[in-house]
Structure formats: C-alpha cells, structure tokens
Image (cartoon, helix red, strand yellow):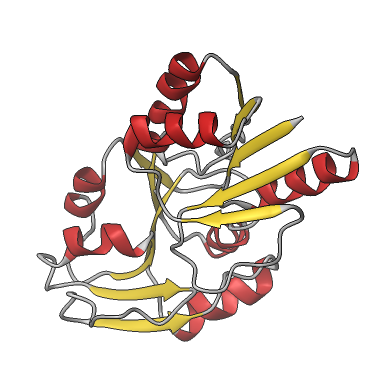
Amino acid sequence: MKILILGGIKEAASLAGKLVAEGHDVTSSLAGRTKEPKPIKGKVRIGGFGGINGLVEYIKTNDIELLIDCTHPFARQISANAIEASKLANIKLEIHSRAPWEKQPNDLWLEVNTLEEARENIPKNACILLALGRQYIDLFKTRKDVFFLVRMVDQPEHALPLSNHKLLLGKPSSNWRDEKRVLEENTITHIVCRNSGGTGAYAKIEAARNMQIPVIMISR
C-alpha cells in the first residue's frame, strides 16, 4: 500500500520501519521543528500541507491509500485536519495515540488543563525546568520573578523572551539519574511539562519523583 504517516515522534519512526519492512510504500511527514531528525525508513517529507485542502491534495496527487496519524498527543490541529482530510479524500485513517503517563503514589503532580493555568500556578521565585516546545515559551515571559531552565534540541534562531533563564541544548536522557543530575545542578524546584506519554521524556518524571520535586502537569 501507499501509506502516509503524519509523524515526528519516536513511535512514528518505529512504525515506518515496520511498514517498510513489510513491503509498503511509506512516506513520513515531519513538521520540521527539528533541524536534523534521526533517519527514518522510507520516504520523508518536511513541512506543513497548508491546511485540510493541502493535505487532501497531497493524498490524491500521490495516490495515498492509507493515512496514519502518529503525531504528538498535543498536536491537535494536524490531528483534526487528518480526520477531515481522510473523509474528503475517502481513505482510511488510523490513529496511533500513545497513552498518557499515569500518576504514581509518590508523584507530586499539580494537574492543570492549559498553559495559562500552568503559568499562574508557578510559585514566586521558583526555579523551573520548562519542558515545553519553543512555540509555547513566549507565554511565560510575564513571570519575571521565576528562573527558567529551557531545554531544546536545536539552538533557537532568536533570543528567548524570558528575562531570567538558562538554555540547555540537547535531548532529555532516558536515564532518570542523568535527569536528576540536571535538576540538582540547576537547583530546580518545579517542573512544567505536558502529559505527552511515551518513554522518551519520562526520565525527568522519575527523577522528580525520586527528589520529591513538584510537577505542574498539563493534561491532555
């Protein structure tokens, strides 16, 4: 089959490899937020489609037979577009959504529904690991009383809007002891993150549990 995977997460790359090994013609579509993504089996396209109509046009032009949504759980717009585009193009849509993390007995979570709620619930003079995508950072610039440790895969093109911050380049470790070291070295008192699920970014949650650091968790 000719398959289009809306990807960008670890699970999508694994799925592409599996489908290519089965003999399918697979194209993975990435948003392009990471400058040098890891190699993915099959074909890769980078960038948006231009909304629902653009996605429909791509599907029809390339004779796509199956659309798979394996995007980040918080990528709501592209997931909504995938549903509408599959209907308009009259092809099957499979949704592969990873399960959210579940709060464990020793976790100190404050669960909120929005980024704004997360920002307002940060205590004064806190030292925060801000584990969010670069597109969400601007919202926190009003908290001039807070220190932010911001981790990014790539060097940002423009200076971050935060008045009191440190930039840490690189991906999070999968080892909670490494994440604990980062939290200790930067005297982190709280973590702000989204309930993304999966294993790739869970180590910081394990480290916070071990250190009894509160996590302001933005729910699905």
Image quarter in which the N terminus is found: top right
Q: Judge from the rendering whether residue 181 lies leftward or rightward of residue 25; answer left or right.
A: left
Q: Is residue 219 visible?
A: no
Viewer-proximal residue among 112 and 8: 8
Please give the count of numbered marks on the rendered protein. 0
Residue occupying the far right of the picture: 22
Closest to the observer, 173 or 158: 158
- Viewer-closest of 189 and 46: 46
- The foreground one among 105 and 20 is 20
Provide residue 89's location: percent of width, then percent of height.
49, 19
Residue 51 on image: x %, y %: 33, 37
Q: Position of residue 23 (x, y in %)?
A: 88, 39
The residue at the point 59 percent across, 64 percent down is 207
Q: Position of residue 210 (x, y in %)?
A: 60, 61
Residue lying at the far front of the rendered structure:
61
Up the image or down, 165 lies above or below 1; here it is: below
Q: Is residue 11 left or right of residue 160?
A: right
Instruction: Give residue 36's quadrant in the image.
Output: bottom right
Residue depicted at x 19% and y 75%: 162
Q: Is residue 32 above or below residue 150?
A: above
Tell me the quadrant of the picture where the C terminus can be found. top left
User: Does 11 appear above or below 39?
Assistant: above
- Residue name at image x 54 percent, y 65 percent: 211
- Residue at 19% x, 46% y is 116
Q: Determine which quarter of the picture holds residue 26.
A: top right
Q: Is residue 188 visible?
A: yes
